Image (tube, rainbow, N blue to C red):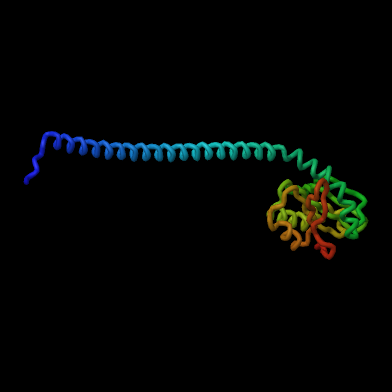
Amino acid sequence: MSQHVTIDDIWKMFEETNRMFKESEARAEARSREREREFQEIRRAMQESSAKTDRQMQETDRKLKEVSKLVGNLGGRWGEFVEGLVAPACETMFMERGIPVHKVHPRTRASLPGNRHMEIDLLVIDGTAVVIVEVKSELKVDDVRRHMERLGEFKEFYPEYADRRIMGAVAGIVIDQGVEQFAMKQGLFVIVQAGESVRLANDMAFVPRLF
């Protein structure tokens, strides 16, 4: 016996198809909303990252400006470092190394014909020896090399000390990596900060170079 398809059957098929279509459309819309949500989340994360980068750049710029300001003020700080820390400590530091200091002259200058000049930050004197101290806010290898040249010419500029043993020292508020050992290998005393004072970084077995 054949089965007859009625109007009700067709209507039910239509309703089922329509229901399936709507469910599929709802799933598609849900996927679309999820993709949109993910996109918005990614965009928000990118915006936050960009804002964080901007803040970091602003902070870096602020720190650079602060450093520039500090560098601009280093002249005064350098003078304080020389006169307030290094000079007063020289007597004790070098006395411990067998150099009985009795005079410390800050910032001396000598001239020779031909527009030649020599400036010395600290001139440390005892009866038989003179220690020439170069002080830098940031001590670099080139500063050590220039000081070696200065030591080689010292007696020419200061002939009154021609009969003395001439030794060299370098000091820095900040000392670049490797510079301390480099200076010691050149035979120089190295003065470093130690809390609110300064000390010699050379060990007690150190033998200074004589000029």
Give the residue drawn at x 85%, y 63%.
204
Q: Residue 132 in the image: state x and y as whole percent.
A: 82, 53
- Residue 36 placed where, x, y %? 37, 37
- Residue at 10% x, 39% y is 5
**Front position in the image: 111 or 69:** 69
Q: Position of residue 156 (x, y in %)?
A: 80, 55
Image quadrant assignment for residue 93: bottom right
- Residue 187 at x, y percent in the picture: 78, 62
Q: Is residue 81 visible?
A: yes
Give the number of callouts: 0
- Quadrant holding the C terminus: bottom right
Residue sticking out furthest to the left: 1
Relative height, residue 112 to residue 162 (above, below): above
Which residue is rendered at x = 71% and y = 48% of the image?
138
As drawn, 89 above or below 21 = below
Using residue 24 as the reference point, say whether residue 117 is left or right of it.
right
